[in-house]
Image (cartoon, rainbow, N blue to C red):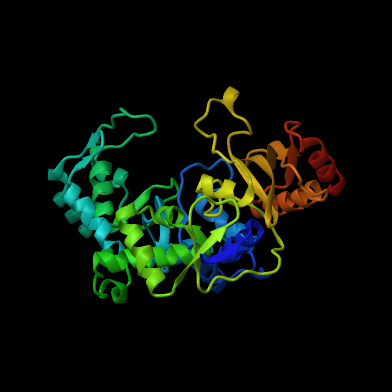
């Protein structure tokens, strides 16, 4: 039968696994960063910058106000601790995962030069590698030589060089040395990005790599279904199911049943279940706690959809909506925008969840003030949209 857990226990296990039971440091350091990354495993990257880049936010939600130079140092200075790859989607991952992604890189090589509806010129590939070898870290724009760009797909404006460079990045022939101020990737040779001791490690067999990815997903989730474990590193079920079975056989995953879940669950043997979680955090739409929407609903009773691509008049809650975690519950959601020109953090809407505690508005106001300070914004402005807006606006006004 396995272990029997209620939903509240599953929430506390999940939040502890994600770092929300850890004590925040007054001044987060690189050691704090490493501890937090060990919890999340990956940091999803997204180009939307209406509030703050997606990869910075999960660290803030767990560590509190921190110097974002910590992330740049971990990603761009030797010895690198993290590197970009297609680990979840585009994401920062611990650099020691590089050998375990070799099977994925091989898949892209075998897939060849066709990228869905987009195709790049194979003749460019060798010349681009040679040019990067000679020039050092380079963006696609650096290597374009004025080539024309064609916009044939919504959201894409890629030159021929960019398409070929993305192919080389996916196959591991090039790595990302960092990003420039325009958030463009700077490509370089792997041997100049990945620490030599990592490159020297033997490439694991595919099955062993799959087991390691599921193991890390289970540590980050604490408690999860096979589908959730599969999604964490975007695996195929033909990879994840045998890996789950192997970890169950080894005693690392314990079969469990969770109240209200219609699928078997698996508890990592080292998962903690604290008696309470005293968290207070705003979660990015790309935070691991909420990025798998069905799991979010099962754990928190919180139906969440990102509405960036929904026409404005059809949005239910707003453009860039962040769930508000208080204790072990998602009690509200706010649509936020950093108006940097006006120096204001703007709450465009604020919605409260059923059974939210009376202190929700006050706690959210305090969290928003802290977020505004971290973003370097001196004012907090609340629009009158949503059932929580009036109470939140009053708390903000009372706090000055």
Position of residue 102 in the picture relative to residue 378 (left or right): left
Q: Residue, x 60% and y 62% (percent of image)?
A: 5
Q: Is residue 153 visible?
A: yes
Find the residue positioned furthest to the top. 313
Relative to residue 127, is residue 278 depicted above or below? Answer: below
Closer to the camera in the image, 97 or 153: 97
**Could you say which quadrant of the image residue 96 lies in?**
bottom left
Q: Position of residue 147 (x, y in %)?
A: 24, 35
Q: Position of residue 171 (x, y in %)?
A: 24, 54
Q: Position of residue 346 (x, y in %)?
A: 69, 39
Callout count: 0
Q: Is residue 131 visible?
A: no
Q: Position of residue 81 (x, y in %)?
A: 42, 69
Find the residue positioned furthest to the front. 1
Position of residue 137 in the picture relative to residue 310 (left or right): left
Closer to the camera in the image, 68 or 180: 68
Relative to residue 139, is residue 160 depicted above or below? Answer: above
Q: Residue, x 31% and y 73% (percent of image)?
A: 198
Find the residue positioned furthest to the right. 398
Relative to residue 372, is residue 48 depicted above or below? Answer: above
Q: Residue, x 46% and y 52% (percent of image)?
A: 44
Position of residue 225 in the picture relative to residue 276 (left or right): left
């Amino acid at each position: 039968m396995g272990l029997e857990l209620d939903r509240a226990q599953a929430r506390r296990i999940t939040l502890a696994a994600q770092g929300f039971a850890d004590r925040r440091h007054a001044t987060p350091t690189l050691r704090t960063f490493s501890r937090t990354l060990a919890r999340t495993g990956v940091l999803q990257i997204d180009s939307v910058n209406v509030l703050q880049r997606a990869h910075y936010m999960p660290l803030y939600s767990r560590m509190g106000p921190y110097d974002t130079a910590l992330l740049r140092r971990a990603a761009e200075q030797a010895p690198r601790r993290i590197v970009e790859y297609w680990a979840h989607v585009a994401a920062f991952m611990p650099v020691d995962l590089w050998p375990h992604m070799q099977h994925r890189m091989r898949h892209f090589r075998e897939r060849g030069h066709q990228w869905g509806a987009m195709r790049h010129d194979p003749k460019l590939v060798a010349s681009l590698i040679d040019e990067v070898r000679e020039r050092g870290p380079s963006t696609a724009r650096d290597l374009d030589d004025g080539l024309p760009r064609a916009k044939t797909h919504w959201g894409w404006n890629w030159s021929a060089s960019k398409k070929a460079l993305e192919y080389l990045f996916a196959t591991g022939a090039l790595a990302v040395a960092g990003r420039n101020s325009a958030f463009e990737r700077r490509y370089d040779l792997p041997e100049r990005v990945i620490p030599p001791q990592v490159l020297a490690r033997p490439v694991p067999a595919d099955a062993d790599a799959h087991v390691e990815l599921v193991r890390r997903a289970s540590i980050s989730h604490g408690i999860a279904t096979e589908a959730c474990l599969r999604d964490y590193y975007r695996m195929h079920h033909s990879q994840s199911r045998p890996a789950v079975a192997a970890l169950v056989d080894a005693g690392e995953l314990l079969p469990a049943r969770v109240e209200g879940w219609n699928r078997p669950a698996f508890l990592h043997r080292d998962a903690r279940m604290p008696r309470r979680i005293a968290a207070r955090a705003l979660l990015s739409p790309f935070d691991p706690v909420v990025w798998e929407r069905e799991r979010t609903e099962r754990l928190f009773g919180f139906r969440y959809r990102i509405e960036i691509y929904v026409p404005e008049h059809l949005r239910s809650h707003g453009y860039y909506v962040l769930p508000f975690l208080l204790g072990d519950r998602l009690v509200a959601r706010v649509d936020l925008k950093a108006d940097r020109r006006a120096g204001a953090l703007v709450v465009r809407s604020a919605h409260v969840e059923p059974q939210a505690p009376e202190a929700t508005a006050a706690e959210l106001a305090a969290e928003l003030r802290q977020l505004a300070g971290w973003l370097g914004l001196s004012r907090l402005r609340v629009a009158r949209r949503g059932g929580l807006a009036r109470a939140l606006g009053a708390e903000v006004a009372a706090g000055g």
